[in-house]
Structures are given as structure tokens and as C-alpha cells.
Amino acid sequence: MRITLEPVVVERDLALLHAWVTHPRSVYWEMQDATRLDVAREYDGIAADPHHDAWLGRADGAPAFLAETYLPHHGPLAELPEISDGDLGMHVLVAPPVRHRRGFTTEVFRAVMEFCFADAAVRRVVVEPDVRNDKIAALNAAAGFVVERHVDLGHKTAALSFCTREAFTASSLGVPA
């Protein structure tokens, strides 16, 4: 399977983004009741932000996931003492499957992590998932993330977690199948 990432183009991708972020499986994306206009505003805002990027992921050419990368020094994590130079924040949302593909989410997560670490300046990938999201916690752990602590971000309690390049490479996800 060939996995690629390209910049989100709101005008082109809005219908997909809206369907994905409002799907019941995407409850931790916190956009369950968002209208198409809400989603357009959110991703237009990301496109205008020099410190935040949205990526459409494709599997064998078909849209399959959404990823975001951001510089933690320029967002809600900026004041946390654990944030340092060389950190890159990441979010990932796998689209609701049309048909089940065993191991697909793992392959997507691996590809997103490789994408993040493709920049030599990135020392660690930072995530801040909702502490109730057990599925992403397991995937993060498999990729080499270590939970630093729980952080109150106002709208959620997050499991502030970091993954070094070395931890990812040594993880089960860092070794391609």
C-alpha cells in the first residue's frame, strides 16, 4: 500500500473533512456538531497559520486520513515547561473505513510519524490526546510515545506525550512490516 500526504485544500476537501470530523468515531476530534461552514473556517484558519498545517492522507491514491502538524511553541502548549526546540505537534484522524483493512490504522500512524521525522530538525513528536481515548493511547505507546503528565487544556484533560526519533525507530511501529 502506498501512503502519501499532501496539503489540505479546503475547497477540494471540505466534504470529506466534514464527514470525517463529525463522524461518531471522531468524538475526540471535538467537532461532532460542526457545520460545513464551521469546518471550512477551522481549516481556512489552519491554512492561514504559519505554525500549523493540515494534511490529507491518501492510501493508494484514495483519501483515507487527516493529519495535522503544528509548532507547540505557538499554540495551547506554548507555556508548558516540557515543550522545547525541535518539538513538532501532531494529530491524526483515520477516516471511517469503507471496508475493514487489518493493520491499516497502524500503517497510517507509521507513515505520519515518518512524515514528522522526515524533517531533520524534529527531535520529538508531541501529542496531547484526551485521557479517555484508550485507542489512541495504545497506538501512541506502540509508536514509542511516553506520557509525561496530564494537562488541563480547558476543553479536555490531555495526556501530554512525547516520542523521540530513537524511541519511534525502536518501537514496533518504527520497524516497517
Image (tube, rainbow, N blue to C red):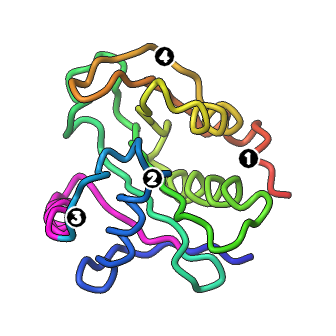
- Give the mark, 2 or 1, whose residue is nearer the N terminus: 2
Residue under the image location 61 percent in, 39 percent down: 165
List the residue tagged with mark 1: 174
List the residue tagged with mark 4: 148
Residue 54 belongs to the span the image colors magenta: yes
- As helix, strand or loop, the secondary structure at mark 3 comes to helix
Calculate the distance from the C-alpha at mark 4 to the C-alpha at mark 3: 31 Å
Calculate the distance from the C-alpha at mark 2 to the C-alpha at mark 1: 29 Å
List the residue tagged with mark 3: 39
Q: Quadrant of residue 64?
A: bottom right
- As helix, strand or loop, the secondary structure at mark 4 comes to strand
**Nearer the camera: disc 3 or disc 1:** 3
- As helix, strand or loop, the secondary structure at mark 1 comes to loop
Calculate the distance from the C-alpha at mark 4 to the C-alpha at mark 1: 21 Å
- Give the mark, 2 or 3, whose residue is nearer the N terminus: 2
Expressed as whole percent of the image width and height from the top left, the position of residue 170 reads: 76, 36
Expressed as whole percent of the image width and height from the top left, the position of residue 55 reads: 40, 67
Residue under the image location 44 percent in, 36 percent down: 127
Position of 101 compared to 85: left or right? right
Q: From which residue to which does the magenta span run?
A: 37-57
List the residue tagged with mark 2: 24
